[in-house]
Amino acid sequence: MEAAVKEYTYKDFASDQEVRWCPGCDDYVILRSMQKALPEMGVKKEDVVFISGIGCSSRFPYYMDTYGMHGIHGRAPAIATGLKLTNPDLSVWVITGDGDSMAIGGNHFIHVLRRNIDLNIVLFNNEIYGLTKGQFSPTSLVGQKTKSSPYGNTQPPFSAGELALGAHARFFGRISGNTPKEMTQIFIDAEKFKGTSLIEVLQNCPIFNDGAYSKFNDKAVREDRMLFVEHGKPMIFGKERNKGLVLNGLKLEVVTIGENGVTETDILVHDAKEQDPTLHQMLVRMEYPMVTGIIRAFDDVTLEEREDALTAQVKSDSNFKKTDDLFFSGDIYNVF
Amino acid sequence: MIATTEKKKQKVIDAVIIRFVGDSGDGMQLTGTQFSDTSAMFGNDVATFPNYPAEIRAPQGSLYGVSGFQVHIGSVEINTPGDDVDLLVAMNPAGLKTNLHALKPGHTVIVDTDSFTKKNLEKALYDSNPLEDGSLENYRVIEVAMTSLTKEALKEVEGLDNKTITRSKNMFALGMVYWMYGRSREYTTEFFNKKFKKKPEVIEANTKVLNAGFYFAETLELIPNAYTIAPAKMAPGTYRIIMGNQATAWGFLAAAEKSGLELFLGSYPITPASNILHELVKHKHFGVKTLQAEDEIAGISSAIGASFAGDLAITTTSGPGLALKAEALGLAMMIELPLVIVDVQRGGPSTGLPTKTEQSDLLQAMYGRNGESPIIVIAASTPSNCFEYAYEAAKLTIEHMTPVLLLTDGYIANGSAPWKIKSVASMPEIKNNIIKEAEEDWHPYNRDKDTLARNWAIPGVPGLEHRVGGLEKDRVSGNVSYVPENHEYMTKIRAEKVKRVQNYIPEIVPEFTEEGDLLVVGWGGTYGSLHSAVKELNEEGYNNIGFAHFNYINPLPKNTSEVFSKYKKIIVCELNSGQFVKVLKINCSEFNFLQFNKIQGLPFANNELVEKFKSLV
């Protein structure tokens, strides 16, 4: 029987290293939410590993009192894949940013999602390069003025969600960087999900891109501008809880309950577990409302399940138990 | 048919070099492999080298669609597949055209006359038929209508389509060569029985054609005698024929079993290294994990992750792939985890000559990373000792906790030779630095006082939670440190750790003479060529020439300078424009090194080496 998992508090997961992010950065919220989520996951501390790339976000492993590796730029998903294949019992977390995952590490990002290995990726998306001091990133907006685009950015952005779903992500969640409670919960849900879980955190960089998300995640407007979806529940938002989504042709449309004969039963019910990602794609593309929560959580076979089944089959079919059995098999001959 | 009661004469020879060439579809690799395996089973020493076109399905009959297989067998020690050949078997005009230059004057070429059609001659860019225009008068040409004879032999076998019939003509050629060199057909007929178990008509067809070729040669007046090549004097034991890449893969299997670790390979396909991936992916029964990654960088990065989690982790590549892996290799060095990188060298730079051999990645292996990042570099030198050096690479990386780069090359990776099978029990022990449980005063960068290897704390053990990474590490805790003195200390200790490997590797032992007028120096895959040349000279009476071949490049064996000091001249021979010699100049600056370099994508030829060495003594 498995030894019972100890009771932890968030303090058990804080390392002795001084946290060195800029004051007011949402990274602090993510760090604390993670430290609060881990005790709720039922995993042993010694089985938790954080792997990161390069960038502000990627300092994260140093602040967690778990196993961790601060890797090289963009390669964390590949490092984590080798780690998880070697020891599938570990709870493996990839910490990455928009540049790390979608610029220099774009290839590993799409392939880890395609393979569906059971690990969790937290993508800190602040739509800017922070650690290199303010260049545009692959999620910066057209026209955005940055250190490397003084007259305005000319490169259209990626949407992390669209890219992920295009790469066959089985789990995609999005969360606002200033909602710690929801963030804690989504980390717990991601860990429980079997397969690659991607959580995009809309993270404010107070220094180089302050207010990137404020038009929808400021406390004052949040309820009216953001929709938090939950599987099996109608997609309703608004201070008055009277706005909802309906399908109009091939587009999602915001309607008001009580107007034009719309009732709550007309509102679409969120189905995160649906295999067909069409509706999930529409949700991630919306700008009003900005959709957060677990948008997609489709259960599928994981890479390690396929590998394990194959290995078990090959092992049971094989006569080779030791390497000597192989070396001395087939066309061998003796010299006397 | 001529009665065969009167036996033809048998001539005894020491060795023979045969090259089989034909169209990609003519089955030359199989023919050559059958001949070399049969010879090995008979007890000859053997070396082979395949030569396939780079195009996967080149147009039939074209010059660049020629596929060849060279085999060198002997009753004497065989070190290379040989240069010029004694017998050329050409299944079509294109094969003849592209390989005739390699046939020794006066020696024999067997051709399939049926394939010398107008169309095939045109495809091979012949203006006139070489069989008729006198251009082969310096050779002994044996013209055989192989395709017709094959059809004739099979006219009574039922259930064969035309394609199967024409395809088996390579067995006619093999049958002829078997008779010429007094080989038994048994191994090959058994091979048919196993390979075509479910197709009895194919077994029958191949066996019939093999026999037909055998008897045809026996009765043909143009072949006046058969040759006998006695078994070679080889050390007693159990042998098998092994290709370099397979030996590399097996060396890692043995090291994994011996060390008690599981093997993980992260790799991206690249010529000529892919066969290592193909081999290891078969061995899931030993718990081998392989990941065909999305690119070279993911190949090495996944291996670093696997190493962090406690596997014997390796990644395989060739030159351009090594360039892509450089940053990750620096990370592995920085975080001081075990990792083996295999670079099967090919002609460079850039994409270069993917199917040709070269030794031009040595400086990349030594220095191709940012910052000061020394790693262990070793090189295999024969197809079969790829096994030992793969094993050694694994042993060194596990024991010394720093990456090891193993260099092989296309020549030894694709070449094959007899391997005296090593049981895992006979291989040296592999100790590891794994920490099993938390203890007081444990720190991630605690080091072994002799090797300076840090300890290996693997996720899953309570109390050993720690972080590693590419930022400079504090010398004890492994936490990020920007302290100037610490950086200098760590830079020096990483270098010292590699240097101390000298205490754990064998000294260099020169061959032929321990002192003399000339020392021939080589490294890696040129062993066979250099050894053969110096041996030949020694047998001619030049007993003042010694030979020192290096398998350990970084660090060099401890006694390197001492060995060099015993010779008047030193010549460093490499298939590049002089890379190892640069390493020697840095480490043994008191000597004057001569150089012999070849940069043609080809191995050294025996005569060019012999001439050069003679001119120096």
Image (cartoon, coloured by chain):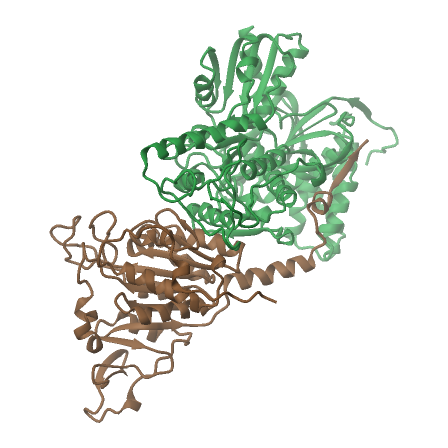
Chain colours: A brown, B green
x and y, in percent, of residue B589 in the image: 44, 14
A272 or B213: nearer the eye?
A272
Q: Look at 28% across and 78% down and name the residue there.
A: A250
Q: Quadrant of residue B134?
A: top right
Q: In which quarter of the image is residue A214?
A: bottom left
On-image quarter of the N terminus of chain B: top right
Q: Does the rendering let one see residue B183? A: no
Horizontal arrangement in the rendering, residue B200 relative to residue B397 (left or right): right
Q: Residue at x 44, y 45 (%)?
A: B296
Q: Nearer the viewer, residue B571 or A197?
A: A197
Q: Where A293 falls versus B517 (above or below)?
A: below
Q: Tell me if residue B54 can be seen.
A: yes
**Position of residue B245 measured from the top left corner of the image (x, y, whole percent):** 58, 39
Residue A288 appears left or right of A311? left
- Where is residue A152, by image quadrant? bottom left
Residue at the outermost bottom position: A261
Quadrant (top left/top right/bottom left/bottom right) for the C terminus of chain B = top right
Residue at left offset 22%, top offset 81%: A238
Closer-to-camera residue (B131/A113): A113
Q: B204 or B309, which lies in front?
A: B309
Q: Where is residue A322 in the image (x, y as percent from the top left)?
A: 70, 48
Task: Residue B75 in the image: state x and y as whole percent.
Answer: 75, 24
Q: Establish if B101 lies above or below A187.
A: above
Count of labels in the image: 0
Q: In this view, does A331 lie above or below B80?
A: below
Horizontal side of A40 relative to B604 (left or right) equals: left
Residue pushed farthest right?
A: B5
Q: In this view, does B239 lie above or below A225?
A: above
